[in-house]
Image (tube, helix red, strand yellow):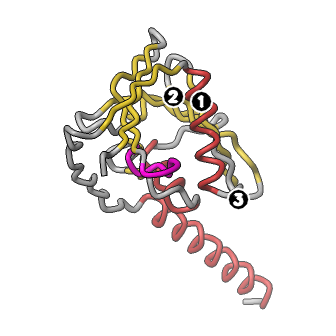
Amino acid sequence: MNKWKIGFFLLAGLVAAAISAVIVFISSTTESVPLPDMNTRNMSDNVLTVKATKENLEGIANTFIRKAMKEGPLPVTMKISDEVLLFSEMTMFSLTFPVIMHFDPVVQQDGNLILKLSKMEIGELTVMPSIILKILKDSVKLPDWMTVRPKEEEIFFNLSEIPVTGNLQVRAKTFNLAEDDIILELIIPQK
């Protein structure tokens, strides 16, 4: 056998092994990150109720995301309409694809927010949502108050951990986007 044939088959084997390794890495399931146990607020704390619009909340969310990510390599932008949309990009084989994730917000009893993935668009590609969330989790340094949970196809926002001036804490009370009824509470501890 001539050396070019051997070289070709060796190179083809290496390429196949590399593609297999990438597929195995991406499709491997990750352990679910448990949600933190949240203490209920002290009833003697002062509470300020704030009614926000979609536009207000979108601007605030993007400001906090931008500051927390410090203009990282992958842009993540939030848009709020009748659902919550996260925009980003994904680069594969020197091609950049726009990624749009559609979420339905769910307010937890403790006032934190979970975004449940309802639909995903990646250019013309069809990819399992859990794989994209795993890539997002592994490739983007998200703020501590955002937890991506690929297995559950959701993103958890620990609102009480958002760095607000002083020792204020934020919690969601109502998050009805269809009626533009967004009510947040600012908790000001007595101590």
Residue type at mark 2: give it: Val
- Label 3 secondary element: loop
> Which numbered disc flags the more N-terminal residue, 2 or 3?
3
Residue that numbered label 1 is attached to: 58
**Residue 1 location in percent, x, y?**
72, 89
What is the residue that sits farthest to the top in this orientation? 179
Residue that numbered label 2 is attached to: 84
Q: Residues within 10 Å of mark 3 (few under 14, many from 20)?
A: few
- Distance from Cα at disc 2 to Cα at disc 3: 22 Å
Q: Which mark is residue 73?
A: 3
Asked if residue 156 lies in the magenta stretch, the reply is no
Instruction: Using the image as rendered, state which of residue 11 and residue 63 is in the foreground.
Output: 63
- Distance from Cα at disc 2 to Cα at disc 1: 9 Å
> Which numbered disc flags the more N-terminal residue, 3 or 1?
1
Residue type at mark 3: give it: Pro
> What's the residue at 54%, 35% (across, down)?
101
User: In the rendered structure, are the residues bearing label 2 and label 3 in contact, judged by CB atoms less than 8 Å apart?
Assistant: no
Instruction: Using the image as rendered, state which of residue 115 and residue 61 is in the foreground.
Output: 61
> What's the residue at 54%, 38% (across, down)?
126
**Residue 32 location in percent, x, y?**
30, 57
Q: Is residue 31 above or below residue 168?
A: below
- Distance from Cα at disc 3 to Cα at disc 1: 21 Å
- Label 1 secondary element: helix
The magenta span reads: 159-167
Instruction: Using the image as rendered, state which of residue 134 and residue 49 is in the foreground.
Output: 49
> What's the residue at 66%, 36% (across, down)?
123
> What's the residue at 59%, 47% (across, down)?
65
Q: Residues within 10 Å of mark 2 (few under 14, many from 20)?
A: many
Instruction: Using the image as rendered, state which of residue 189 and residue 109 is in the foreground.
Output: 189
Residue type at mark 1: give it: Glu
**Residue 36 location in percent, x, y?**
27, 54
